[in-house]
Amino acid sequence: MRYGRATMPRVLEVDAAIIGAGAAGMMCAAVAGQRGRRVVLIEHYHRLGEKIRISGGGRCNFTNLGCTAENYLSQNPHFCRSALARFGPADFIALVERYGIAYHEKTRGQLFCDGSASQIVDLLQRECALGDVQWRMPCQVIDVDAASEGFVVRTDQGSVHAKAVVIATGGLTVPKIGASPLGYRVAAQFGIAVVAPQPALVPLAFDAEVKAFCAALAGIALDSEVGCNGGRFRDQILFTHRGLSGPAILQISSYWRAGATLEIDLAPGHDLEAWLLGERHGRQRLDNMLAALWPKRLAQAWCAANQCATPLNELGEKRLREIAHAIRCWRLVPAGTLGYNKAEVTRGGVDTRALSSKTMAALRVPGLHFIGEVVDVTGWLGGYNFHWAWASGHAAGESI
């Protein structure tokens, strides 16, 4: 595929200009191009599909078998239903299988490539080639303006006159690989509201005391259940030098707001109170008992911090009940998140109440579409955000 500059006309006439060649943008371009539309795909970063390449440990968790609207957060929670209903996991799996890409289910319906995430990038490039999609890459967009019969997209390689423009610029996560606020600026320019962006699926930071406790346990992973603001997830938490991470923490971070309290069950599925009270007359130390549930280092540190590294028969029934409750409901108030550099996605974005759920087009600006992460639709961890990219890109590609 050629991305040269020398032969490009100063004004390019197309049916659709798609800004952003990530997962959503390439899907949209491929679908529209294969419908016979003249499409140009404009990407400012010098490497194609970099967020796809680095995802899933380099193997790309490209969808989830259990994908439904309930796996997404938005101020307009029903918005994503239409696109997901028209392009589900089976549709993308069929595309993966058509290209002979081997894949496997890891846990909870999460599908990964057996080989490299680059296979998904290659698939999308080949689908774009089937639609004769033109490319401008790397190419900086200067501005987007309304024009007669469409829009003018001015770039550092000349102008593009397009009947439709699709904004697929993603969110603010991982700025070192090209994250840009361009999509939010375009929305604001055309009077479309933007829900304040925030890092999501991101590790959480804590005050000095909790940070020191976690740092001393860095590397320990534990099956836990974490809740906040109506969200609740059972999965691993990971103690780190900077606080808490791991799948359960990443999941709940999308629900967390500044000042909110996390409730962490460090022994999910166990009737801890009955267990401790049943042994209350014994002389076994509590930290040694808890080492049957947890890594020994955690059991010792937790009991030391809570001044209960003593034999059970010295603690008493009331104290044992308090300990069981503290373990089943460890309450923490995060100081913040580790920010966009460590986040997997951006929460918030273009307000979906201003968009058509069928076409992804702005209701008051015909021909201007927003897809993927730039939109206020945020999926859970586990392939849901990539599937929103495919579904929203497909919806827009079918309509332009």
Image: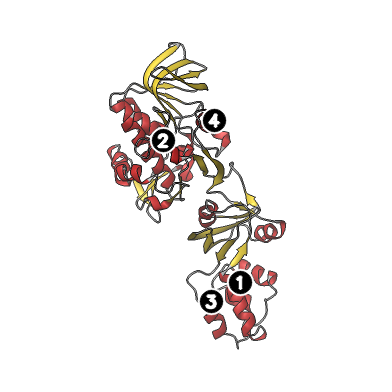
Between the C-alphas of marks 4 and 2, the distance is 19 Å
Residue, disc 3: 272
Q: Which mark is residue 384?
A: none
Q: Quadrant of residue 60?
A: top left
Residue 304, placed above or below residue 49: below
Q: Which mark is residue 326?
A: 1
Residue 121 relative to residue 196: left or right: left
Quarter of the picture holding the N terminus: top left
Tell me the crowding category of disc 3: few under 14, some 14 to 19, or many 20 or more residues within 10 angstroms, Cα based: some
Question: Looking at the picture, how far across and down is residue 312, in whole percent?
Answer: 63, 83
Q: Are marks 2 and 1 in contact (CB under 8 Å)?
A: no
Question: Looking at the picture, how far across and down is residue 175, in whole percent?
Answer: 57, 35
Mark 1 vs mark 3: which is more N-terminal? Answer: 3
Residue flagged by tag 2: what amino acid is it? Ala
Residue, disc 2: 24
Tag 2 secondary structure = helix
